[in-house]
Each structure stands twice: as structure tokens, then as C-alpha cells.
Image (spheres, rainbow, N blue to C red):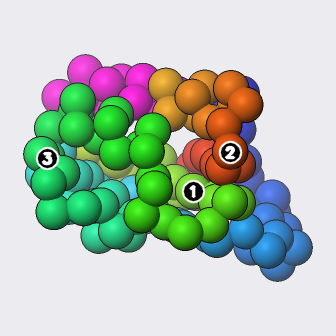
Amino acid sequence: MLKFINTTEFKTIIKTNSANLFILEGKNMKTRSDLFSEIAKILYFPNYFGNNWNALDDCLQDLDWIHSNSIIIIIRDFDKILLEDNTKEKNIFLDCVKAANDFWEDGQEKKVDFYIQN
């Protein structure tokens, strides 16, 4: 299940976890273009990333280029994401994150956890 966390829980995860941690800042993802750019940069997406929703789905459910069996991805300031785009875009993004979270919960070799903080 996708986890929604508050500031205290965010700080606890940062302090107590040995997984590879990636933090996506909502304030840097106010447009769809910014969102794709920020995620690709922070998660080291391969050059073939197509900067579209299908490509985001594919990459979030791959992550083979991150050489770790334990990964945490925290999306901070979720309320700031895609503020300058259609609200439908934010729902599409959330669907991509939920699909990736479901994929990684389904007995994959890697453990990938997604957290959303407002």
C-alpha cells in the first residue's frame, strides 16, 4: 500500500533507514516537464526515458540501474506537484506511483517503498 507520511514520520525514515533513499521535491515539479526532469535526475533514469507517462510507468517499475535491493522513494510537498498544469495530470502521476508501488510489493527481488509527504 502507498504510504502517506507527515513531517515527523519523514524525519524518522531518514534517520533510521539503511536503504538507498531518493527524495523527490514537489516544489521542483510544478509542470509536467519539470516533473519528468526532476524524477529522471533524482532516480538516474536512463537516457532513453521518453518524458511521458508511459515511460515513467516503465522506468518506475524497472530501476535496474540502481544497484541496491532496498530503495525508498519519498515524494515531498505533494500538494505543490503540477500546480501549473491540469489537475488531471496530478491524478495520472499518482496512478503511476500507485502502479509502481503495487508492482514492487508483488514479490520482486528488490524492495522499493514509496512514501508521499504533504
Residue flagged by tag 3: what amino acid is it? Asn
The answer to whether residue 95 is above or below residue 28 is above
Residue 51: assigned label: 3
Front residue of this view, candidates 56 and 115: 56
Vertical arrangement, residue 79 with respect to residue 87, above or below: below
Secondary structure found at label 3 = loop
Q: Which residues are magenta?
A: 86-98
Tell me residue 35's x, y (percent). 25, 52
Picture coordinates of residue 92, whole percent (x, y): 31, 25
Label 1 crowd bin: few (<14), some (14–19), many (20+), radius 10 Å: some
Give x and y (percent) for residue 37. Answer: 20, 61
Disc 1 marks which residue? 73
Foreground of the two, 87 or 102: 102
Residue 109 marker: 2
Q: Secondary structure at mark 2?
A: loop
* Mark found first going from the N terminus, 2 or 3: 3
Q: Quadrant of residue 12?
A: bottom right
Measured Cα–Cα span from mark 2 to mark 3: 26 Å
Which residue is farthest bottom?
15
**What residue is at 81 percent from the left and 58 percent from the top?**
9
Observer-nearest of 48 and 84: 48
The residue at the point 79 percent across, 74 percent down is: 18
Q: CA distance from mark 2 to mark 1?
A: 17 Å
Q: The residue under label 2 is which amino acid type? A: Glu
Q: Give the distance between the C-alpha atoms of the residues marked 1 and 3, in whole angstroms.
A: 19 Å
Q: Nearer the viewer, mark 2 or mark 3?
A: 2
Residue 23 within the magenta-colored segment of the rendering: no
Dot 1 falls on a residue whose secondary structure is strand
Residue 68 is left or right of residue 52, and the answer is right
Q: Is residue 28 visible?
A: no
Where is residue 42 drawn, in percent x and y? 38, 69
